[in-house]
Amino acid sequence: MKIQRVPSKWAKTKVILQNQSLSMYVPDTRKYDLNVLKEMLALYTMVYIKPDRGSFGFGVMRAEQRTVILSPSQQNTEMKDSPNNDEKEQQEARILFILRYGKSAEVFFSSEKLHEALQKRILNRTYLIQKGIDLLRHQDRPFDLRVLTQKSPSGAWETTGMLGRVAAPQKIVTNYHSGGSILSVNTLLKNHMTPSEALSTINQLQSLGVQIAGQLESTYPRIKEIGLDIAMDQHKDMWLLEVNTLPSIVIFKLFPDKSIYRKIHRYAVAYGRVKARKSPYSIRSKQSTKA
Ligand SMILES: Nc1ncnc2c1ncn2[C@@H]1O[C@H](COP(=O)(O)OP(=O)(O)OP(=O)(O)O)[C@@H](O)[C@H]1O
Ligand SMILES: [Mg+2]
């Protein structure tokens, strides 16, 4: 039977939110519209706006609300010329909206103008807006974690791989396909916590993968593999950014420990994602049968 894939991030989020012990990991996520944009910027200051059915980080945008104090010279001339005001009184607080995507940034002076710019990129597609997480950094670049959980040949969910993804310079996404680099979870966590805290974080991630897989399976009974995108904020709290139902497995080939990929591949063969590789032995034996 065909492996089930669920492209809609919104559909998967709703299923995860049904489980109370998992809902605490899900950042506030809603369908995008102007009122929701205003409300969420007021609540969180920074938000991510992304396609409901996106991948590779394509189409992901980030909006931020900032209050800046303008000095008299930055204000309009009318104010600058008004008499009897000393400099302090003339200082003005203004709210700016910064939109970032790819390596670009644009500034707007109202949420309506920000929305207009977003709308041009969204067109008639469904987009989600999510509380922005201030990601932990590695050498001043934000990173997040990918956790791979698969159905084992014995039919149990098992977390088989984990890695960290560091954003390319000036990028707002960490995806490998958007120039991000892959590092081991240990390398990334060791600068932010003690070895025992790192170990317990890794255990927690493994168990989160298994719990989320079980929860999704209750609605999508033919899923066999998932990839969690987990963000860690400055308090080292974990947040589930999204769940992929067609996770990359080849990225795990990059690790020097080849046994990790071998197991991932073996499980993927067992549930029918990939075909078994011919070992040199089986090729040789075929040739010798021919001869
Ligand atoms: N709420 C958020 N806070 C902080 N960073 C985020 C948030 N949402 C997304 N990101 C960043 O953008 C990246 C891409 O977002 P997301 O994983 O939701 O979509 P996608 O990668 O395009 O989908 P897929 O993983 O299926 O390819 C994340 O890996 C993360 O680096
Ligand atoms: Mg992703």
Image: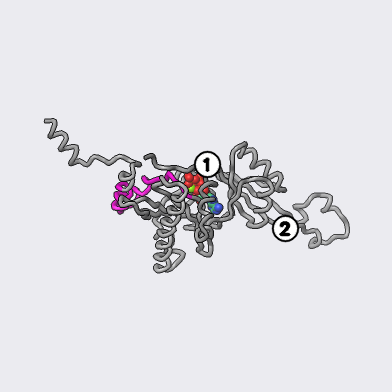
Looking at the image, residue 49 lies above or below residue 284: below
2 or 1: tag closer to the N-terminus: 1
For the magenta stretch, what is the residue range? 243-266
List the residue tagged with mark 2: 69
Q: Position of residue 81 (x, y in %)?
A: 85, 53
SS at mark 2 in the image: strand
Q: Position of residue 41 (x, y in %)?
A: 66, 53
> Residue visible at 53% across and 55% down?
18
Give the residue type that dot 1 points to.
Arg
**Closest to the observer, 117 or 105:** 117
Q: Is residue 205 visible?
A: yes
Left or right: 195 in relation to 238: left
Q: Position of residue 131 (x, y in %)?
A: 59, 54
> Residue visible at 20% across and 41% down?
280
Left or right: 164 in relation to 129: left
Q: Residues within 10 Å of mark 2 (few under 14, many from 20)?
A: few
Disc marking residue 53: 1
- Marks 2/1: CA–CA distance: 39 Å
